[in-house]
Each structure stands twice: as C-alpha cells, then as structure tokens.
Amino acid sequence: MYAFAGFNTTSGSPVATAAVIQDSGACTFRYALAGLPAGSYTIALTSDSGASFKRTANVTVTGAVTQDFAPTRVIRVGPGRQFTDPSQVTGLVSGDVVEIDAGVYNGPAVTWSTSNLTLRGVGGRAHMIAPSTISNGKGIWVMAGTNQAVENIEFSGAAVPDLNGSGVRGDGTDLAICGSYLHDNQEGFLGGGGRLLIEYSEFAFNGNCDNPSGCAHNIYVDNIARFTLRHSYSHHARIGHTVKSRAQENYILYNRIMDEATGTSSYTIDLPNGGLTYIIGNLLQQGPTTDNPVIVTYGEEGLTNTNHNFYMVNNTVVNDRAGGTFVSLDAGTTATLQNNLFVGSGTVVSGGTVTQVTNRTTTAPNFVNIGTFDYHPTATTPGLDQGTAPALGGTFDLTPLYQYAHPTNREIRPTRNAIDIGAYEFVP
C-alpha cells in the first residue's frame, strides 16, 4: 500500500508505505498508515512493488481515518433482485462488484469479460450448477478479463464434448479465486494468465483420463507467470492430478492435498515443465488406490520453463501406497529438501542435484490420528525440535509462517525451541 501526496496521483515518490494484511480465513484485506500529516492523499494498492496499481482511493487526513476501496457499483443477484441469475447481468463496467445471494443457480454458462470485476457470494455460497449444454464449450464461468476475483462461489457438474468442462476457466489475466468450492466437474479449474491466486478453497472429485489427448484434473494451470495456491484443500481427483501447474513460478503454501482412503488421483503435485517452485508447509498424501506411485513430480515432461530451482520445506508427506517415490525430479533440477517428514515406504527423492537438510523418514509417525488424516504431531512423533532454520530460497523466505487448519484455513505456526520437522509445530 502506497500513499502519495495529493488527490488522483501516483507519480513521484510515495510519502509512506504499509503492508496489506489479509484477514485469516477470509477474502478481505486491511492496512494501516500511521503518522500522516493532515492533508490530501492518494492511497494506492499494488502487488508488484509499485510498478502498477490495482486500486486507488482519495483520502483526506484530519485525524483517524478509515477508508475502503469503494466499488464503482454493487450489483445484486438473487430471488427478488433486478437480476435473478448471474447470466442475466448486463452493462458491467470496470470496478463493479456483483453480489450473488446464497442459493442454487441453474442458468446458462457465463463469460465475464469486464476487467477489475469482483463476483461474490453473500449470505453463504452461491452454487452454480452447470447447464446440460455449456454453450461456450469451456466451463460454467469463463473469466476473460483482467484483475478479476471470484469469492465464495460453488461450481459443479461442468461437462463439455472435449471432456475439459471446467467449473472455472481462466482465459484472462490476473485472477483470484477465494473461499470457493469446485467439485464434480470434468476439470475443476483450467487455465490461468498472468498471475493466478487460489486460496481458502476446496477442489474435489474433478478429473478424468478418458480423453485420448490427455487427462483433466482438480486444478490445471497453464504456462503463466505465477501460480499461488494457499490454505486450500484439494482431494479425490479422479485419475487426473490433484494439482498440476505449468507456471513459470509456483508457490504451493500451507495446503492439504490428498487422496485419503479412496482417491484415485495420479500425481499429488505435478509440475511437468519445472519453474521456480516453493512447496512449503503442506500436508501431502497419496492413498492406497492411487493411479501413480509418485507423489510430487517436477520436470517430467522436460524443463522447458526458464528456472529449474525447486524448494520443498517443512511438509508432511504420507505414502499410504505400498512403495513408490515421494519426490521425482528431472535430472536438470537444483533442489533443496529441508525439514520434511516422509511417512511410509518408498524412495524419498530421485533425480536432480539435491541438497537434503534435516529431513526425516518414518513408518511410525505417531500422529494424533493418521486414520482420519489428522497429521498433527504428538509428543512421540519423530522430528520434534530436530529441524534447522530455513534460509532464503532465492529472494523468498523459506521459513513457514503458517500451518494448515482444516478445512481451508490457516493458523500461525507457533515458535518453540528448534523448529519441528514437518508441516505442524508440536504444542504440548
């Protein structure tokens, strides 16, 4: 967050900056700028260190000030509203917010082309059930603008002839999906463009490998600039991968990604073209009926992305299959594996040039309840106080700040003695 002197200006040097803080478990953010002298200011929100600004607001400081980034308009959808289905909304302009009342919607598929648009379920999730024919041939919602957000929406039942029918299709640039639930589609999410953020969301029972030209997945990200998945729950992909990304950069942080007892997914995480990758603080598991013996794979279709650095830090990785490989790397990978707890049988890592630091392998993890997939440690879990402090991976701090809280949430990771090995810190 940058503050500039004067109204309607983002030129010159800012007079103050502040971090933007996201509310825990929510799609809302806040900031605090203290000590500004009385006067007129432009407050600007940036995601790229001031190279561009997503929102601006004029603020007059005379004392304590609270300022929202007000939408251009709020358009409401639901029973008794002007629009009773999202497909009926017309006349959108940049900066609009569409609020959709909780409930079930069976209208036609929609392509959203307006930039700087937020689509939000209110009063609970708004559930978009796919029509029997998806006219755009892609998905229930196609996000085709720039800087769009989907919040608190459920998508199910997408099916199209090419078997890639998506709950959400990303055809635009810079999309955020927050607090949403995508399930029982041919493809949960497909696409990307620019930067993709998925957080506090659940993906389940999407996928297939019936298409001769390739499989569909819970999450399938194209070759985009950056993909961030955090505080989310992806599980029970149908034969396809639970998470697949071709992005140039991948930040997979504090998630629960699993087959559980009955899932049949292929890879838990598939990064087929490499890319700068950070996998930190996740719960990863492949089940006894998985379709593939590898849990995490990197570069298995060739390292065509520019960066080949792979960092995997403080994850808990459970193999409930008889044998297999926890991490499979292309030979050209430079990898750091640190403070990971590997549970079950199999090869820990194959391929690549790998630096391993204080990882632990065990068949007796003594979790709170491994049968219900509660991987919190107990006093007898291996690796307590036996990790080493992570450093930087490039310019990114590898130290885990959070730990996954089920379902689709986060909590601050406690600090106590030396860091524990695995995705959770033990608290007596």
Image (cartoon, grey):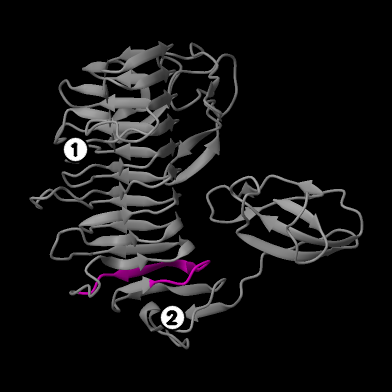
Q: Can residue 315 be seen in this view?
A: no
Indicate the secondary structure of the residue bearing disc 2: loop
Disc 2 target residue = 78
Screen quadrant of the C terminus? top right
For the residues carrying marks 2 and 1, which lies nearer the camera in this image?
1
* Residue 163: % across, % down: 15, 59
Residue labelled with disc 1: 266
Determine the residue positioned at 46% across, 80% down: 77
**Left or right, 392 with reference to 53:** left
Residue 82 is covered by the magenta coloring: no
Q: In this view, does 20 lie above or below 115?
A: above
Look at the image and give the residue range highlighted in magenta: 112-131
Quadrant housing residue 264: top left
Q: Position of residue 9 (x, y in %)?
A: 75, 62
Q: In this view, does 367 lie above or below 59?
A: above
- Circle 1: is it few (<14), some (14-19), or many (20+) Cα within 10 Å? many
Q: Residue at x 43, y 13 (%)?
A: 383
Q: What residue type is labelled 2?
A: Gly
| Separation of marks 2 and 1 at Cα, in angstroms | 39 Å
Query: What amino acid type should be assigned to the residue bearing mark 1?
Result: Ser
Instruction: Please identify the quarter of the rendering in which residue 107 is found.
Output: bottom left
Q: Is residue 117 magenta?
A: yes
Instruction: State which quadrant residue 262 falls in.
Output: top left
Q: How many marks?
A: 2
Q: Residue at 29% x, 42% y: name it.
A: 244
Residue at 76% in and 66% down: 58
**Residue nearest the observer in this picture, 362 or 170:** 170
Instruction: Tell which circle, 2 or 1, labels the residue nearer the N-terminal end.
Output: 2
Dominant secondary-structure state across the stretch colored magenta: strand
Residue 372's place in the image compared with 55, above or below, is: above
Q: Is residue 79 visible?
A: yes
